Amino acid sequence: MPRKKREEAHVMPEIHRMVVIGDSLSDPGNMKARRLADAIEVPGTGLDRAGTGRFADGNVWADFVAGARVTEALDHIRADHPDFKANIDAFADSFNRQLTARGHVIQCEGMELARNYAEGGATAARYNLFWSAAEEVFEEIEELPHTVRRFVVEHSAGNVWSKIKNKFWDVIENIKDFFSTAASIGAQGIVKNIRDERRQFIADEKKAKSTRDYKDKTLVVEWSGANDLVTVNLEIVDEPEDVRRAVDARIKNLSRLYYQGYRNVILVNMPDLSLTPEYAGDGLMPGGVMTKEQYRAKLSGVVTAFNGRLREKFDAFKKKHKNFKGEIFDAHAHFGQIYQAPQDYGFVADRKAECLVDDGDFAPVCEVSPPNPKGYMFWNPVHPASQLHEILAGEFIIFAKAQGFSFDASKAALMKLIKAKVIRRDYLADQQQHAQSSAAVLQQLTLAAQQANQAAERLEAVAARLENLPAADRGVRTSAAGAVTDTQGTLFAVVPQIQPDAANAAAAIEEHEEGGAAPGGPGVAAAVV
């Protein structure tokens, strides 16, 4: 490949798959699925009000992005294959209806569009009193490239154990902080962190034996940190150390992905959490220490500090790794613009401090089953409504394209699926036509058989009458009997031929009515995009 083309290929990565890591803002139903599987009750999540299993009244941003990838790919196929447009249009609606989330996979009729490991409650950093300091060090060694890992294990044991000792004392020093966080989290293991999600993703990739090319066509999107700021702690964090821990955990996660071979990564920064209905209105916050206005100002400042450090650390990482391609999607700015002018985005201005459902703690600000769900920015006190997710998804796609990512689904895979659908449609049409023809043949054969039987019966009657003729008419009788015998022989030869033809026609009709197997069925055109 000429140098210029190689550079263009690097500038425009062809993305066939998106992987999402994060918390409830991106959860496609993972927390609800795990809660049901493990019989874990997590009060206050509002999931019992979510029919889709998401923390929203419908799809979240990642679902909309996955669906848009198919839509855009179909548009490109229409432009590239105008003679095939009618076939594409015939199946476009079915593609939009068939977007499903199974396990961690978001797919469309067998095509993998994205993997979403995000789970409600997930934190960026780890908050667990009982994890070993050595565990993290060994994890760091384990996730290094093979050659580097071997060198560390064989030649740097002293430094490794020194690091273990230092981390152990760090844990002891901060143990009082861990106790305060454990009280608000509850039993550890109910919520995850992005390290857990990343490790699950990497484990799945190893099972699938992902190739270098496959990784180059993967875009990882990571969005976390909100739970570190307002959920883990009994009160809102305000210490620089708390912000540092959460941000550094995200950068560390980015580094782990990079060294595993994933070079296309977008991080999403923190929207202004102080604008959610939970903190709307006046009066005192629970505990009576601060007014809501004071709390909003403090929380907004913490979010600003978080985003500032995230930008600083991300830029440093990007500068250090020249072949890394990624950026920070500014959800803070987009969310702020929508909040300041909600009517421009289809929301009702006086509903931006309200939400669709009440989880029991915020009855004054959240309606229950409002008659008109349109126009609400929030689904519950802290989570956006699906309408807002869709807008953010549109902005994200524009942003991703601006970074040089070719963001539509694989046109080759979609063409393969469409062609398989066309083959199946044409096959079923042929089967229907064959069944109709067979029905006509069966009707004709049945009539012929009936007529042959009737003729045979008449000939038998004629033969009986001939037997009664006088002896003087013996010559006539002999001649007529010969004709009868010949005719009967012909009929007896025809009827056996009619019977199998009739049986075949009947079988063809029965197969069509039962929906017999056709080419291009499930699995034939399945592809990874």
Image: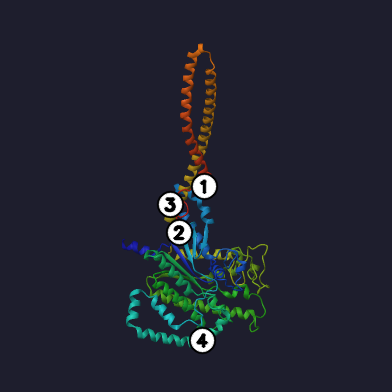
Q: What type is the residue that disc 3 sits on?
A: Asp
Residue in the foreground of this view, choosing between 224 and 279: 224
Q: What type is the residue that disc 1 sits on?
A: Gly
Report, in whole angstroms, how far the alpha carbon at label 3 lies from the one at label 1: 34 Å
Residue in the foreground of this view, choosing between 269 and 490: 490
Q: Residues within 10 Å of mark 4 (few under 14, many from 20)?
A: some
At x 47%, y 45%, the residue is 427
Tell me where residue 470 appears, x and y as whole percent.
Answer: 53, 13
Tag in front: 2 or 3: 2
Q: Which residue is mark 1?
A: 515
Q: What type is the residue that disc 4 sits on?
A: Ile
Q: Which residue is mark 3?
A: 80
Tell me where residue 492 appears, x and y as whole percent.
Answer: 47, 29
Q: Which residue is the extreme one toward the top?
A: 472
Sequence-wise, the earlier of marks 3 and 1 is 3
Sequence-wise, the earlier of marks 4 and 3 is 3
